[in-house]
Image: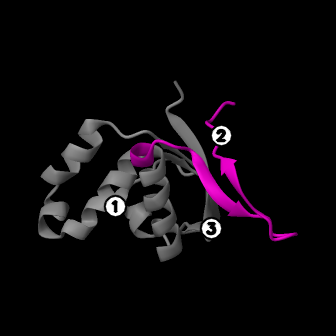
């Protein structure tokens, strides 16, 4: 069973040196991934921070960053944060790895499978 899925952020994370990181990997979440953030003091102080801590746990790679931390997730553009939340929901809750896409050249709409890493 594949548990990791590649993604590409719409805008990308810009690090302190100005490099843009768009390619990444997200793994399927475990029950502990959803429980552990509830113990985090930042989440207790602000429920909205739950998404930040959760994504930092399941995004295993982003560009050539050494680690994906809550601070990295905090630094994402809003469009990238929304993309990752939707991606998380799609692979963990919906149970499908297909997305609706539109061809940029001809405008045709179709479904496209998100291919698991390594396939």
Residue pointed to by mark 1: 52
The crowding category of the residue bearing disc 3, from other C-alpha atoms within 10 Å (few below 14, some 14 to 19, many at least 20), is some
Disc 3 versus disc 2: nearer the observer: 2
The secondary element bearing badge 2 is classed as: loop
- Residue 80 shown in magenta: no
Residue pointed to by mark 2: 115
Residue at 54% of width from left, 29% of height from top? Answer: 2
Residue 24, how many percent across, how many down?
Answer: 58, 50
Residue 64 visible at all: no
For this view, does 50 lie left or right of residue 9? left
Quarter of the view holding residue 108: bottom right
Return the mark for residue 63: none
- Closer to the camera in the image, 40 or 109: 109
Q: CA distance from mark 3 to mark 1?
A: 18 Å
Residue pointed to by mark 3: 10
Q: CA distance from mark 3 to mark 2?
A: 18 Å
Quarter of the view holding residue 92: top left
Q: Are marks 3 and 1 in contact (CB under 8 Å)?
A: no
The secondary element bearing badge 3 is classed as: strand
Q: Earlier in the sequence, mark 3 or mark 2?
A: 3
| Residue stretch in magenta | 92-119
The crowding category of the residue bearing disc 1, from other C-alpha atoms within 10 Å (few below 14, some 14 to 19, many at least 20), is many
The secondary element bearing badge 1 is classed as: helix
Residue 100, how many percent across, how many down?
Answer: 64, 59
- Residue 118 shown in magenta: yes
Residue at 52% of width from left, 73% of height from top? Answer: 79
């Amino acid at each position: 069973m594949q548990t990791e899925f590649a993604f590409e952020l719409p805008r990308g994370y810009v690090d302190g040196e100005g490099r843009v990181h768009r390619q990444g990997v997200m793994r399927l979440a475990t029950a502990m991934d959803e429980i552990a953030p509830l113990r985090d003091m930042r989440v207790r102080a602000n429920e909205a921070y739950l998404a930040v801590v959760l994504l930092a746990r399941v995004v295993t790679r982003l560009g050539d960053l050494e680690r994906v931390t809550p601070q990295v997730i905090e630094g994402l553009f809003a469009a990238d944060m929304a993309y990752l939340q939707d991606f998380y929901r799609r692979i963990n809750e919906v149970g499908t790895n297909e997305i609706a896409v539109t061809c940029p050249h001809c405008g045709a709409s179709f479904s496209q499978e998100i291919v698991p890493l390594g396939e």
